[in-house]
Image: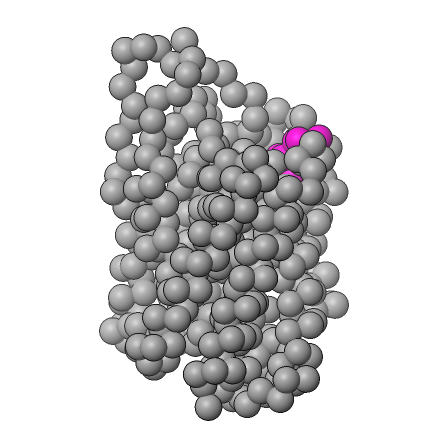
Amino acid sequence: MPMQNNLPQGADLFGDIEPSPRVRARDNIPGLIVAGLATLAAAALASRYGAPLTLLALLIGLSLNFLSSDKRLAPGLGLAARELLRFAIVLIGARITFAQIGALGPEALAMVSVTVLATLGTGVVVARSLGLSPSRGVLAGGAVAICGGSAALALSATLGERRVSQSDVTLTLVGISIMSAAALMLYPVLALTLGLSDAQAGYFLGGSVHDVAQAVGAGYAFSEPAGETATIVKLARVALLAPVLALVGLAFPVRAEAGDEPDAKPAKAPLLPWFVVGFFVVAGINSLGFIPAVASTVAGNAATALLALSVAATAIRTPVADIMKAGPRPLIVIAASTLVTLALALGYAMLRID
């Protein structure tokens, strides 16, 4: 018999855990309403106090975690945490053009790639040294390296819940939110203290702050030119999401596990998940100028909303007791990855950028 899994079935991209039971469309409504109301509450608070939407969606979702035992909500929460997340990843491509990324220059673009790979590697090495699985290191390191909670959710979709559980994802979201909020407050001050130029500060902030909105906000907090540079650098990091997901999919293929039937054949995963292909396609179309500015803005806002909805749903359906059992080790992995990103981005900005 297939191995049983009592955890919520989120982020099961390749069907590598037991398939979710078939449900009618109307069965999704209760869970979607709850997740939607949590997201609207987070949006209202974010608008009122200027706090990050994703962070507030996470906190409100965790405050509603007691609803995870209500089976009527499971289908809708699962839909928000899985399928809607993948559509959000595709829409992120509308924020990016290849020309913007190319404007950085080959050296800076190469350094962004080196930083992302080094941060990913740090996550894996530190996780293994602490007795955690490499997949949890990839989850934490990738979230730090690319775009915070968005990358964490995308990586969890590629890794599958056999490798990273919902509690792993939520704990990563909590740690990333804490680190990103601290970076937003401290990194611009550090840039000012070190006397960085606009170009240096823009690269440093765009290359080191975790969340997209906070990276851009940190750049503009320094100066408008720094904000423009920070936006392009951050978009370059986001653009690496798709190739990183492809590499992770190759490095962590679907396989049979202990407890499966001996003759069972593992599911065949596509070389590239459909949402990764969609990400590339949308970014390419946007690069060719076929997406009007208004449509790009709408798509970006829709991606932000869907990501917040997915974060809220993931937090609501996560077993909080499992998060508490994890202890400080996953947070240490995030902290170590953050320090590597900080050191590499700041070092390059100071040494190579006028």
Span shown in magenta? 316-322
Residue 313 visible within the image: no
Asked which quadrant contains residue 15, the reply is top left
Residue 263 visible within the image: yes
Asked which quadrant contains residue 264, the reply is top left
Q: Which percent across, then down, holds residue 235?
A: 43, 69
Asked which quadrant contains residue 21, the reply is top left
Q: Is residue 143 above or below residue 265?
A: below
Q: Is residue 130 magenta?
A: no
Q: Which percent across, then down, holds residue 273?
A: 31, 44
Depth check, front residue: 293 or 62: 62
Quadrant of the rendering where the N terminus is positioned: top left
Depth check, front residue: 252 or 77: 252
Residue ID at (42%, 39%): 159
Q: Which percent across, then down, holds residue 232?
A: 43, 76
Q: Is residue 318 magenta?
A: yes
Residue ID at (66%, 35%): 326
Residue ID at (67%, 26%): 69
Q: In the picture provided, is 251 more to the left or to the right than 65?
A: left
Q: Is residue 7 above or below residue 311?
A: above
Q: In the picture provided, is 259 more to the left or to the right than 34?
A: left
Residue ID at (59%, 39%): 130
Depth check, front residue: 146 or 344: 344
Q: How many marks?
A: 0
